[in-house]
Image (tube, rainbow, N blue to C red):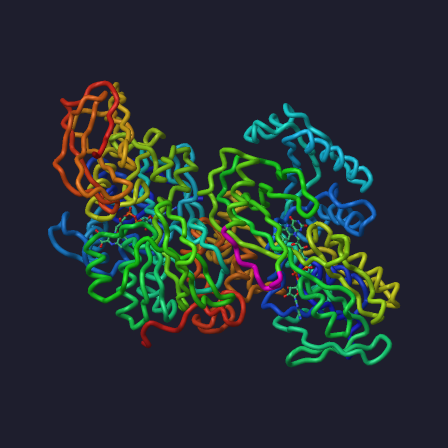
Amino acid sequence: MKYDVVIIGGGITGTAIAHELAKYDLKTVLLEKGPDVATATTKQNGGVIHPGYDPHPGTLKALLNPKGARMYPKLAEDLGFHIRPTGTLVVAYSDEDLKTVDRLLENAKINGVEGVVKLNSQELHELEPHINPEAKGALYAKTTTMVDPFEVAVAFMENAVENGVELQLNEQVRGIEKNGEQDFTVRTENNEYPTRFIVDAAGIHADDVAKMAGIEEYQIKGRHGNLAVLDKNVPIKTVMFPCPSPDTKGIALIPTVSGNFLIGSTATMRDDKQDVTNDKVGVEELIEGAKLLIPEFDPSSIIRTFAGQRPVALDNDNDFYIKESPTQKGFIHAAGIQSPGIASAPAIAEYVASLLEEAGLELKKKENYNPYRKAPTDFSELSHEEQDRLIKEDSRWGKIVCRCETVPEMEIIEAINRPNGARTVDGVKRRTRAGMGRCQSGFCQSRVVDILSRELGIPADEVRLEEDQSKIFSGKVKEL
Amino acid sequence: MTEKDFDVVVIGGGPAGMAAALEALKSVKKVAIVERNDELGGILNQCIHSGFGLQYFNEELTGPEYAQRFIDRVGDSEIEVFLNTMVLEIKDKTVIAMNEEGILKLKAKAIVLAMGCRERTRGQIRIPGTRPAGVLTAGLAQRYTNLENLKPGNRVVILGSGDIGLIMARRLKLEGLNVLSVYEIMPYANGLFRNIKNCLDDFDIPLHLSTTVTKVIGSKRLQAVEVSAVDDNLEPIPGTEEIIPCDTLLLSVGLIPENEVSKTAGVDLSKITGGPVVSNDLQTSEEGIFACGNVLHVHDLVDHVTREAEEAGRNAARYALGETSESTTQIPVEASGPVRYVLPSTITNTDEKVELKFRVGSPIEKGKVTVYLNDEPVYEGREKEFVPSIMETVTLSPEKLSDGKLRVEVK
Ligand SMILES: Cc1cc2nc3c(=O)[nH]c(=O)nc-3n(C[C@H](O)[C@H](O)[C@H](O)COP(=O)(O)OP(=O)(O)OC[C@H]3O[C@@H](n4cnc5c(N)ncnc54)[C@H](O)[C@@H]3O)c2cc1C
Ligand SMILES: Cc1cc2nc3c(=O)[nH]c(=O)nc-3n(C[C@H](O)[C@H](O)[C@H](O)COP(=O)(O)OP(=O)(O)OC[C@H]3O[C@@H](n4cnc5c(N)ncnc54)[C@H](O)[C@@H]3O)c2cc1C
């Protein structure tokens, strides 16, 4: 049976599109080469839902970012993911910076972003008493929220799957053939997917995928960024940026949804698309950036560093590259989704649906479409009374697996057994936060391995951290 | 929800918690230990090597043997032990915990913190590079190997010369793994001398000082590490990089007292040790909450842990009985020069001898400890060697103390 749409790539872009297309009577499949959704750039970013004061008016970004950001609160409610209103400060240290603030204020107006004001030095210090005393003022965008992009992608995908979209993991697209009008064959190592339309949401590899279909319209390079995770002890409430440069928003201090803090991100172009290593210079830049915002910042609060690459479509004015290929009709690019790709994703998805419709796909609303997803239980957020009640219902709620984040065994079992459930240690970690705390899984990793082994019915020494080669153990110490 | 009243509730059932509870029981009736593991003993259960108890029992025991002596005493006593029970927070002198039966609220007259410590991880020392499988702390590798029969890898490099790393070097070598070498960024080893000898020298495992791992290589499983020599400021020296192919990197780069629960009670923590700030009766900044063992400061010998915990247990019981008199003295104690920290940070009770415990920040080949009261020497030690891995003690008799400020210095 032929598919209407094959979506290639299960990052925030691909999963948002799957969630959107699930509303319609279509046969859709999402192909993802990783063992889980959101294992590339979507798990390696700041998670800031920028309200949209930043993009240059007239660009696709300026259209889709504010719109996407406005969609988030309702989506969070319908799909049960965490969202935390924080607001953003763009801090000015000089008269020139203050001019930048005025420019952003003007931008916000043109882009239709509400709740953006200018603060003088006194107002700024009242809002954030620990900020650099030299700060002269700031832009204050009140509507900024924070999400966990991985959680959002999982929520999009679960809802899509429950509404009939197919998800194929560990399926890397290796070839694409055009057989005729609205007639493609997408090939992976073991399977073929005949389809009418293709949406290429393969992130940093979108251009490589397009090439398989003979399309060489654009090229993608990565803009690498280091990030650092801090323990829960920075005295700020708001996301804080310095004034931006043309290429980057600068090093920010970010209070995350889960109560941790991030410093992010550096920005340097890289030739190697796979390179998500941390570099010393970059991490030092993060520390300096944090100290500029909060002089008392203590670098020893860093518990982990990581990095990602923003997929940048070259010679495209730093804009997203979203359009139907002029040469290969029916092939839609959802590419060059650099920052703020998370904030824009829901609007990108609607835009892609409209492009598909223009290209000849009929979008008929599904009758029994369910817009809701029941959020998994987050034990640590419950009151002691509710916790007590759950434990009395099932004692596995009383068995703590991750001590740093208070994650009980039952929460992990649920994460494995949901639609699009966890298959790897990292998959469990990203769904439940087990292993994300101060000890960085020193304690719980072996227990998570045991639970995965039991729930998936595989031996413990075959449980993986993430990808296929990432086996955690090299066997048993002694054969018993 | 279960609610219960106690005189003394001890959090943590390692050697510190057990000794504190046993000692408290000598003066009060209702004592509890809350332990999140399924057995008492704490970290000792995975330390299957010998070298414990030389001071306390005058015998050389393994970790589990040392623990068992206390487990037996606790078992024979009236102490109520909650196993598989994790303390979530302390609120108004009530210890809130959970287990498979539900949430427990244990109301206490006095509380003893004995939660031990955890290991520093890769993020905390910020090694650049990729994040593959195969990079783990030495203690986790110890758990896998000794308790779960799982092999962490084949070709092993160890970063840091802390005792756990040294002990794991020998352990993994004995299990047939290829242990390539141990790298230490400092110009001296961090572990006990006897461990360097027994675990590395006797097994021909090289120890490279002033050298550190500067990059982790491999996208899925660890493939190699890059090591570099460092200069006097601990900065890598360009040109000295060397690539060591390996599939496992064990980190033995320090321990941090486990004080999340202490924070919920509002206990003040020291920036240097990471443990609570205490007076000489081991009481924290919160009245009626005492601390001992590795949660207070990292100990190298369990015998010291036991002694310290007995004192904390005794004082907690006294507090529960309302026997502590309002103290009038307040003598602050500070570390100076090469002395990294001194415990306690204040002396409030001068009825008995006062023991000061301290560590130096870097080795001193020949030095002498002097304790000053308001710049007047009140104690002077013999000339000897000081190393960061060994905790030193000085005992002062009460008549030497009067109002003022104490300072501990090594010259
Ligand atoms: C350091 C940093 C900080 C950022 N901060 C923010 C922020 O605060 N706010 C914000 O809104 N945005 C931020 N971004 C941007 C955001 O992360 C990206 O825009 C977004 O994640 C891009 O998502 P994507 O789905 O397009 O790509 P990806 O997440 O990379 O997904 C692409 C998917 O395609 C799969 N794939 C690739 N090739 C194939 C193939 N041949 N077959 C099958 N599957 C394939 C990959 O495995 C991957 O899962 C940041 C980015 C970085 C790097
Ligand atoms: C690998 C290694 C090798 C060592 N080798 C030697 C040696 O050769 N000789 C020697 O003398 N000493 C040695 N030591 C040192 C000695 O074992 C320790 O100093 C001692 O065990 C510390 O005791 P403790 O009770 O303070 O902490 P732990 O033994 O760590 O006990 C703390 C207990 O508290 C529990 N706990 C923590 N938080 C909570 C909570 N929220 N709720 C409930 N329970 C909680 C923990 O589960 C644990 O059982 C070694 C230590 C290690 C780690």
Looking at the image, residue B11 lies above or below residue A157? above
Occupied quadrant, residue A256:
top right
| x 73%, y 72%: residue | A211
Q: Is residue A125 visible?
A: yes
x and y percent of residue B63 in the render? 23, 56
Q: Which residues are magenta?
A: A271-280
**Quarter that holds the N terminus of chain A:** bottom right
Looking at the image, residue B342 lies above or below residue A423? above
x and y percent of residue B131 in the render? 49, 60
x and y percent of residue B272 in the render? 35, 38
Comparing B58 with A56, the one in front is A56
Comparing B57 with B198, the one in front is B198
Queried whether the magenta region covers residue A378, the answer comes back as: no
Ligand 1 sits in quadrant: bottom right
Queried whether the magenta region covers residue A278, the answer comes back as: yes
Q: For this view, does B308 lie left or right of residue A82?
A: left
| x 51%, y 51%: residue | A305
Looking at the image, residue B384 lies above or below residue B403? below
Q: How many marks?
A: 0
Q: For this view, does B248 lie left or right of residue B362?
A: right
Q: Dominant secondary structure of the magenta stretch? A: loop
Q: For this view, does A405 lie left or right of residue B299?
A: right
**Quarter that holds the C terminus of chain A:** bottom left
Comparing B166 with B261, the one in front is B166
Q: Is residue B136 visible?
A: no
Q: Which residue extends farthest front? A: B239
| x 67%, y 25%: residue | A120
x and y percent of residue B370 in the render? 18, 30
